[in-house]
């Protein structure tokens, strides 16, 4: 069973305040910010490793990211994945979700022989949830997102996704693209031995030419989503402080809301 897991390096949450949007290019700038593997992508790695333990085969990691994210991706190798592919080229910069999915699909197709492609349900920074379905469409595989349960029996996968009032059950045949939710499992810890072994696992970097992609389909030029105007929210409205008994303060707030037309 050959499984690919798409992993996205995202900024470490403690450094979110350092992410800026360049006003000229309108692109996110994350330079110098420590990166981690998108947390739910570790649930996808865990699911892949459990399937490998049950059915054999190999687990490969695939990421479209800048070259300096190699060490971040190696954390997935330390968890137990067998190989990593970093898809990296200046021509991929500024990609929206469609241009990202095209690059990932080209990498996954070049790797070939895959039975299952797992992703996280959403990234912690972009968070569009687009990639699993876009990858499925581009690869010609059936796809499903937000999986909370996953059982493989022969070549049939039984799956559950969570909805507001319960669950929906699905059955599918391989090959599939599946986006997993955090409820699916608890990712294993990386061990010191795992970190040491990861240093010698195969790590391949492919660029635009290796993937045979046309630059007009990648990066900013291949992205149908173009940012509009940027506006800073207006600050500086005066706050009014109340003191006294809660009932009196509630009465004053209600009066203000009535004056503003928020309450009848
Ligand atoms: C106009 C525009 C310009 C942008 N420019 C940049 C830029 O210059 N640099 C930049 O970093 N981002 C940029 N982005 C954001 C970038 O397009 C998205 O982060 C990316 O396309 C994935 O979308 P998402 O994070 O919403 O993925 P989601 O669909 O929320 O992610 C779901 C899952 O897909 C997988 N996945 C997502 N992205 C990747 C990836 N890159 N590699 C491997 N697996 C992945 C992961 O498993 C993830 O859990 C830009 C977005 C727009 C709209």
Image (cartoon, rainbow, N blue to C red):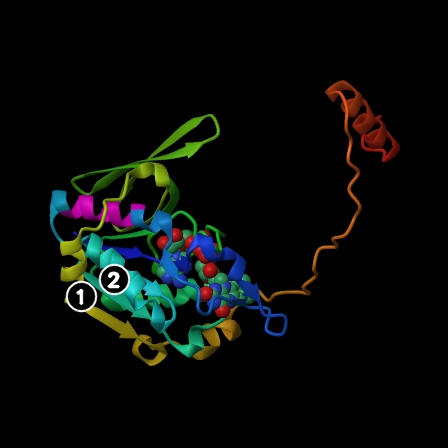
Q: Earlier in the sequence, mark 2 or mark 1?
A: 2
Q: Is residue 224 visible?
A: no
Cα distance between the residues tagged 2 and 1: 8 Å
Q: Nearer the viewer, residue 46 or 109?
A: 46
Viewport quadrant of the C terminus: top right
Q: Nearer the viewer, residue 232 or 184?
A: 232
- Tag 2 and tag 1, C-beta contact below 8 Å: yes
How many marks overall?
Answer: 2
> In the image, 19: left or right of 91?
right
Task: Report ligand 1 position as a quadrant.
Answer: bottom left
Q: Secondary structure at mark 1?
A: loop
Q: Is residue 72 magenta?
A: no
Q: Nearer the viewer, residue 208 or 47?
A: 47
Answer yes or no: disc 1 within 8 Å of ligand 1. no
- Identify the residue at image location x=43%, y=73%: 92
- Identify the residue at image location x=46%, y=50%: 129
- Identify the residue at image location x=23%, y=46%: 189
Which residue occupies the extreme right position in the image? 259
Q: Is residue 46 magenta?
A: yes
Q: Nearer the viewer, residue 89 or 263?
A: 263
Question: Which residues lie in the magenta part?
Answer: 43-52
Q: Which residue position holds label 2?
A: 74
Q: Is residue 127 visible?
A: yes
Which residue occupies the extreme bottom position in the image? 209
Residue 220 vertical position relative to residue 176 in the rendered view, above or below: below
Q: Which residue position holds label 1?
A: 199
Q: Quadrant of residue 73?
A: bottom left
């Amino acid at each position: 069973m050959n499984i690919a897991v798409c992993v996205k390096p995202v900024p470490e949450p403690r450094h979110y305040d350092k992410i800026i949007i360049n006003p000229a290019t309108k692109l996110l700038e994350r330079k110098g910010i420590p990166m981690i593997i998108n947390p739910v992508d570790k649930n996808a790695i865990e699911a892949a490793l459990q399937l490998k333990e049950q059915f054999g085969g190999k687990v490969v990691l695939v990421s479209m990211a800048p070259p300096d994210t190699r060490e971040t991706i190696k954390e997935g190798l330390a968890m137990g994945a067998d190989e990593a592919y970093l898809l990296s080229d200046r021509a991929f910069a500024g990609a929206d979700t469609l241009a990202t999915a095209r690059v990932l699909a080209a990498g996954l197709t070049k790797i070939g022989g895959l039975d299952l492609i797992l992703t996280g349900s959403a990234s912690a920074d972009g968070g569009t949830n687009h990639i699993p379905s876009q990858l499925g469409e581009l690869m010609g595989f059936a796809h499903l997102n937000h999986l909370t349960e996953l059982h493989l029996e022969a070549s049939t996968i039984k799956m559950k996704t969570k909805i507001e009032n319960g669950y929906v059950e699905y059955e599918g045949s391989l090959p599939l693209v599946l986006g997993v939710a955090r409820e699916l499992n608890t990712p294993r810890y990386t061990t010191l031995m795992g970190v040491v072994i990861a240093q010698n696992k195969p790590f391949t970097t492919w660029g635009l030419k290796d993937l045979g992609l046309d630059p007009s389909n990648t990066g900013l030029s291949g992205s149908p989503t173009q940012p509009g105007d940027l506006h800073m929210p207006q600050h500086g409205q005066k706050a009014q402080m109340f003191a006294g008994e809660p009932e009196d303060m509630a009465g004053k707030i209600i009066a203000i809301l009535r004056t503003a037309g928020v309450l009848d």
